[in-house]
């Protein structure tokens, strides 16, 4: 039946689409990356692989992908033999862990990937329960992977000054100057994907996806419409923005004590060990809080994105006013009000009104590759325009990062 499967290999979440021969999306779903039990940070997993745990990390990832593929096939009511092509993309670390390659070149200078080309992997090497081999997208550098390349492949009619940001554990950024894509990445941490957040979760039923201030109460929007179970990336950003607006958080990111707040909103503030927390939901079954540690992890994530954007612009010879459009994809969902982005200062101010969202740009790019008659040629042409450069650890990044921590 010539079905196709696209797989987004996220550090925190594995996502997939099953496509009809026409390119129509028949099923889309996601699962938690089982490697998370070895640490939310990709660098921790790479170090563990380097220390001898590579086979276990590979087995966990393949097991998660098998579960994802099985769920896609079952929901589409087809068989594994109906799938004639499967393609995946991920950051350099996840891509190497999938193949159990040596990760030394990623961990240590000069931070180069062990491969950079589109790779065809036999069923004997990686068995996902399908008869088709797996195609794995190329890597651009030791810090920019096939996931960003896939996002770029999804774009059409790109104008100079287009900035794309794939928000995730490893925030990847790309700026088109008219001739080439300047690309880089910043270690944002897993907060945007619900990781290292006490009540964090992936985007699924029960996740708080938005928070509004309705007079003197916090109004939650929950995926699936039921009771809230936790915060996904968009809900976290929205809650922080509303708490800042309501005066529950100061500009440094400190959660205030209840006697510092002069409105009825002080009832959301509760003592939490040595600091204060925002209890944004309570019912007979659970209590959900945003703690001071959660807020600090969010600040680190948004600070990395903000600082990375500024350094990328400087490196390409742009200023924020030169940016023609900003495309956000990844962990923040399909959309967030611009006011939320402004209140948490995710990006430089002149760019915020030019921002729009792409729902899972990685899967969109893989879908474009699978359904195009010249997918490999388009991919090769794109990779020839990519100019990577390192970001984290440079003096310019550290300077902007410290400035970007305030809310």
Image: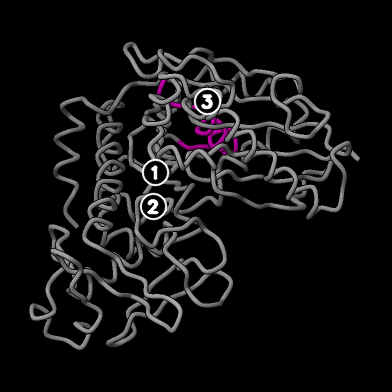
Residue 197, percent from left and from top: 35, 56
Looking at the image, is mark 1 or mark 3 nearer the viewer?
3
Measure the alpha-carbon separation of dots 2 and 3.
36 Å
Work out whether residue 345 or residue 47 is closer to the camera in this orientation and state it: 47
Residue on which disc 3 sits: 97
Measure the alpha-carbon separation of dots 1 and 3.
37 Å
Q: Residue at x 29, y 65 (%)?
A: 290
Secondary structure, mark 2, is helix
Residue 99: mark in rendering: none
Instruction: State the quadrant of the C terminus.
Output: bottom left
Residue 354: mark in rendering: 2
- The correct choice, above or below, for 280 with respect to 39 in the image is below
Residue 145 is a magenta residue: yes
Q: Residue furthest left?
A: 260
Residue on which disc 1 sits: 324
Instruction: Name the side, left or right, on which 401 lies relative to 44.
Output: left
Boundaries of the magenta span:
142-159
């Amino acid at each position: 039946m010539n079905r196709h499967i696209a797989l987004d290999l996220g550090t925190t979440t594995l996502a997939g689409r099953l496509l009809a021969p026409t390119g129509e999306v028949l099923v889309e779903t996601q699962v938690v990356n089982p490697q998370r039990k070895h640490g939310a940070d990709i660098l921790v997993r790479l170090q563990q692989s380097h220390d001898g745990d590579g086979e276990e990390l590979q087995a966990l990832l393949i097991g998660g992908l098998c579960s994802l593929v099985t769920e896609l096939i079952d929901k589409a009511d087809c068989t594994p033999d109906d799938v004639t092509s499967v393609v995946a993309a991920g950051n350099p670390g996840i891509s190497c862990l999938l193949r159990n390659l040596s990760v030394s070149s990623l961990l240590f200078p000069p931070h180069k990937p062990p491969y950079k080309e589109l790779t065809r992997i036999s069923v004997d090497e990686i068995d996902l329960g399908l008869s088709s081999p797996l195609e794995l997208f190329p890597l651009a550098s030791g810090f920019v992977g096939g996931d960003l390349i896939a996002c770029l492949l999804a774009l059409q009619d790109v104008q100079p000054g287009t900035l794309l940001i794939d928000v995730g554990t490893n925030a990847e950024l790309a700026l088109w100057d008219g001739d080439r894509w300047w690309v880089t990445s910043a270690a944002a941490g897993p907060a945007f994907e619900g990781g290292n957040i006490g009540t964090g979760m992936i985007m699924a039923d029960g996740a708080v996806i938005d928070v509004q201030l309705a007079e003197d109460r916090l109004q939650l929007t929950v995926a699936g419409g039921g009771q809230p179970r936790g915060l996904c990336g968009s809900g976290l950003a929205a809650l922080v923005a509303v708490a800042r607006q309501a005066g529950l958080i100061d500009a440094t990111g400190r959660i205030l004590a209840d006697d510092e707040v002069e409105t009825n909103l002080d009832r959301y503030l509760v003592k939490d060990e040595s600091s204060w927390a925002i209890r944004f939901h309570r019912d007979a079954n659970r209590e959900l809080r945003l703690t001071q540690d959660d807020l600090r992890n969010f600040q680190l994530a948004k600070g990395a994105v903000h600082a990375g954007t500024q350094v990328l612009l400087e490196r390409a010879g742009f200023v924020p006013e030169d940016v023609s459009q900003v495309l956000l994809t990844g962990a923040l969902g399909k959309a967030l009000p611009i006011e939320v982005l402004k209140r948490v200062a995710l990006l430089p101010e002149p760019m915020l009104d030019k921002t729009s969202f792409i729902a899972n740009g990685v899967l969109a790019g893989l879908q474009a590759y699978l359904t195009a008659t010249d997918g490999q040629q388009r991919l090769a042409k794109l990779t020839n325009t990519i100019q990577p450069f390192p970001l984290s650890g440079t003096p310019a990044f550290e300077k902007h990062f410290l400035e970007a921590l305030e809310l």
